[in-house]
């Protein structure tokens, strides 16, 4: 497992097993569900089993560890050391008011910095076709472009605070077309990673607290 490209490996696995995962995004996909799936993929499907002679590369991924979305550890038992925390959000077009997901995500990431922890933010953006009037974005490109545009605004940059930076190359996760309730339906999922670019000093951390 390439820890530096952790999200990329997870997305690649889901993409390679698209038929198994894609339709699941049709329902009330939430952070708890996706975190559970990611833990299963990382720990068992991709395998954190160490190679012979590389016992120091043993990793484990946990969800809901002390109420954190995901926590990556190296080593086992009492010898395990925390590598990073990962805060996770799932975003749909009809609930895409950025204040409902972006601010809570960054606030959660900031709270992990107070614990002197490495932290990342993972956002799974799920576009689904529909005929409801509330469907604001009529194409997946409109939806993903709207999020990319928001991430470049002064408001989002103020929240990022020169501490975090989003990777603007969204990662493909899943895509499918199928019949749902007697009509065609399409789902497109992409992922966004927000990573730490600056470790805060104790004085700066005091301001976060």
Image (spheres, helix red, strand yellow):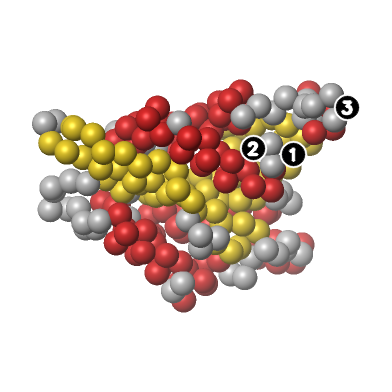
Query: Left or right: where does residue 178 sit relative to residue 115?
Result: left
The answer to whether residue 69 is visible is no
Task: Say which quarter of the image contains residue 100.
Answer: bottom left
How many numbered marks does the figure carry? 3
- Measure the alpha-carbon separation of dots 3 and 2: 25 Å
Residue drawn at 73 percent across, 31 percent down: 59
For the residues labelled 3 and 2, say whether their Cβ atoms are less than 8 Å apart: no
Q: Mark 3 Cα within 10 Å, few/some/many (few <14, many 20+)?
A: few
Q: Position of residue 191 (x, y in %)?
A: 47, 49
Secondary structure, mark 3, is: loop
Secondary structure, mark 2, is: strand
Q: Nearer the viewer, mark 3 or mark 1?
A: 3
Instruction: Compare marks 1 and 2 and give the one earlier in the sequence.
Output: 2
Query: Left or right: where does residue 123 sit relative to residue 185?
Result: right
Q: Name the residue under label 2.
A: 71
**In front here: 75 or 10?**
10
Q: Name the residue under label 1.
A: 82
**In front here: 157 or 147?**
147
The answer to whether residue 57 is visible is yes
For the residues labelled 1 and 2, say whether their Cβ atoms are less than 8 Å apart: yes
């Amino acid at each position: 497992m390439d820890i530096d490209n952790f999200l990329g490996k997870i997305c690649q696995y889901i993409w390679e097993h698209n038929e198994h995962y894609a339709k699941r995004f049709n329902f009330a996909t939430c952070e708890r569900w996706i975190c559970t799936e990611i833990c299963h993929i990382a720990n068992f499907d991709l395998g954190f089993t160490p190679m012979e002679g590389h016992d120091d590369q043993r990793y484990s991924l946990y969800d809901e560890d002390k109420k954190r979305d995901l926590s990556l550890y190296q080593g086992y038992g009492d010898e395990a050391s925390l590598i990073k925390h990962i805060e996770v959000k799932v975003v749909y077009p009809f609930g895409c008011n950025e204040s409902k997901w972006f601010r809570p995500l960054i606030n959660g990431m900031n709270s992990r910095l107070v614990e002197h922890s490495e932290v990342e933010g993972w956002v799974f953006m799920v576009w689904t076709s529909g005929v409801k009037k509330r469907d604001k974005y009529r194409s997946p490109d409109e939806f993903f472009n709207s999020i990319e545009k928001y991430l470049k605004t002064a408001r989002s940059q103020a929240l990022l605070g020169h501490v975090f930076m989003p990777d603007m190359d969204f990662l493909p996760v899943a895509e499918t077309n199928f019949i749902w309730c007697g009509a065609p339906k399409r789902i497109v999922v992409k992922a966004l990673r927000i990573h730490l670019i600056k470790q805060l000093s104790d004085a700066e951390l005091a301001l976060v607290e």
